[in-house]
Amino acid sequence: MSRKQKNVLIRIIVSAVLLIGLLITERFVDISNAYLRLVLYLVPYLIIGYDILKKAFKGIIHGQVFDENFLMAVASVGAIAIAVYENGSYSEACAVILFYQIGELFQSYAVGKSRRNIAQLMDIRPDYANIEKDGEIV
């Protein structure tokens, strides 16, 4: 794993632990203050999703509106807006970003592994080749 992949993995683990902790806490403790719930769920959301939001914002500035980062940002911010409006659960927004980042990590790992395997195959090729023409090696 590369350093970047390890950093993403750490963020995924921290965010998942916080999200699971919040879900368990809400089972046993009634957090009736809507603003407190929003702030508590924004912590794992921003830990896992700040880079997606940042890339989406940069994409909008550069005119690349409909890339995957923008669409994920719209989906997760929309889930937060619905939770705020209907006093619902913020866990969906966190889960959307969390599962997206897990998928991106798997994709990055697979692409890196494929590139390393191709590079290893290129290393086993011979440095030169003999050409036989009319029975003689040229």
Image: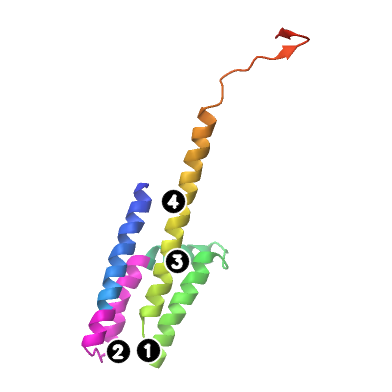
What is the magenta segment's predominant secondary structure? Answer: helix
Q: Residue furthest left?
A: 29
> Looking at the image, which is closer to me, 62 or 91?
91
The answer to whether the residue labelled 4 contacts the one labelled 1, judged by CB atoms less than 8 Å apart, is: no
Q: Earlier in the sequence, mark 2 or mark 1?
A: 2
What's the amino acid at mark 1? Gly
Q: Amino acid at mark 4?
A: Tyr
- Specify the label residue 100 is tagged with: 3
Q: Circles 3 and 1: CB distance less than 8 Å?
A: no
Label 4, label 3: how far apart the Cα atoms are: 14 Å
**Relative vertical location of residue 59 with respect to residue 41 in this rendering, above or below:** above
Q: Earlier in the sequence, mark 4 or mark 1?
A: 1
> Is residue 46 shown in magenta?
yes
Q: Residue at x 53, y 65 (%)?
A: 68
Name the residue carrying label 1.
Answer: 88
Quick one: which residue is furthest to the top in this view?
136
For the residues labelled 4 and 1, the Cα–Cα distance comes to 35 Å
What is the spatial separation of the Cα atoms under label 2 and label 3, in whole angstroms? Answer: 26 Å
State the residue position of label 2: 34
**Pointer 3: residues within 10 angstroms few (<14), some, or many (20+)?**
some
Which badge, 4 or 3, comes first in the chain's sequence?
Answer: 3
Q: Are marks 2 and 4 in contact (CB under 8 Å)?
A: no
Task: Describe residue 77's horizontal placement relative to residue 67 as left or right.
Answer: left
Tell which circle, 2 or 4, labels the residue nearer the N-terminal end. Answer: 2
Question: Residue at the spot x=50%, y=35% of the render?
Answer: 119
Which residue is at 54% across, 61% downward?
Answer: 62
Q: Of residues 12 and 120, which is closer to you in this image?
A: 120
